[in-house]
Amino acid sequence: LGHVLLHEHWPWVVITAFVVCSGNRGRGDVLVKGFQRIGGALVGTAIATLTAGHLDAGSHLVVVLIFVILGLAMWLRARSYAYWAAGITAVLSLLYGFFGVSGDDLLVHRLVGILIGGAIAVTVSWFVLPIRTRSVARRHTATLLRALQEAIGQRLDGEEPDRAAVEHAAHELGVIAPTWRIHHRVTRARPSPAHALEALEDCVSATLDLGNSPDRAELGEAARALGAVRRQLRDSDSIAPLTPALQDLAERLHRAGNTP
């Protein structure tokens, strides 16, 4: 499709399809990433078009703006991929202007390529080889709960818990959190996986803050409650129903760590 529709600009289709599909953490994640890339590119094009008309070719100010935009895009990328897509599109437009090349047609081709590549990526992820986002969430939640239980057991045995394992499992689960937050804002479901993820974040924080002398009785109760949560997860198709039990677990862990 890239060769047929965009000729020499075909790489923008391929790159977009690759970027949107890479690191696939469920079809919802791919859909969100596709919209972020398309939306960011559109915003970046609009900003660059308004700015480029006031700058001369070869202007040093263009070089300064390019580095400023790249810095902002890299800084904001952790918040949303859309910022990175907007920044790169704006930088390309400014580069065209710096060398005296009319960038309107090139940017239009880039946007068309992004739209086609994004549509292909989403279609493949939803209909050719679908991976349910809730299945990804269940798998990473199970890994995190196991790491938490091992950490609590180590603390009960008087050992230092494996913080790295807990933090790694929490990071892997946190990557899909933005997708579930968007899902909650759209559906307003209660409880939703977003609520369960918030409770899990609280459990992680409480576990890592236990200290050297936790209340052993409370910590033992928390360990039993955590075992019950793991059994509930095995019988559930979604992490959303776990929300009340996870909130109760977080409260127990906080009480266990609040001993003088």
Image (cartoon, grey):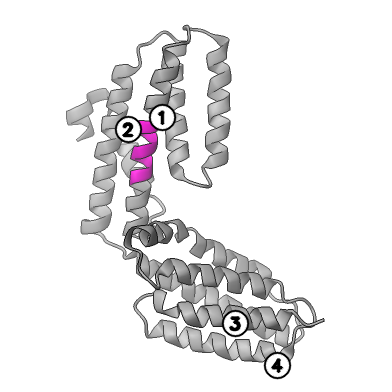
Query: Mark 3 belongs to which amino acid?
Result: Gln
Mark identifier at residue 227: none
* Point 82% across, 81% down: residue: 260
Of all residues shown, which one is farthest toward the right?
A: 260
Q: CA distance from mark 3 to mark 2?
A: 46 Å
Q: Secondary structure at mark 4?
A: helix
Which mark lies nearer to you, 3 or 2?
3
> Looking at the image, do the residues carrying marks 4 and 1 touch, with CB atoms under 8 Å apart?
no
Which mark lies nearer to you, 2 or 4?
4
Q: Main secondary structure of the magenta part?
A: helix
Choose the circle earlier in sequence order: 2 or 1. 2
Pick the front one: 75 or 256: 256
Which mark lies nearer to you, 3 or 1?
1
Choose the circle earlier in sequence order: 3 or 1. 1
Across and down, in percent, residue 67 comes to 57, 25
Horizontal arrangement in the rendering, residue 8 relative to residue 150 (left or right): left
Q: Secondary structure at mark 3?
A: helix
In the picture of the structure, the residue carrying the numbered disc 3 is 149
Horizontal arrangement in the rendering, residue 107 relative to residue 254 (left or right): left
In the picture of the structure, the residue carrying the numbered disc 2 is 12
Q: CA distance from mark 3 to mark 1?
A: 46 Å
Horizontal arrangement in the rendering, residue 214 relative to residue 4 (left or right): right
Choose the circle earlier in sequence order: 4 or 3. 3
Horizontal arrangement in the rendering, residue 54 relative to residue 107 (left or right): right
In the picture of the structure, the residue carrying the numbered disc 4 is 217
Quarter of the figure with residue 125: bottom left
Q: Magenta region: which residues? A: 35-44
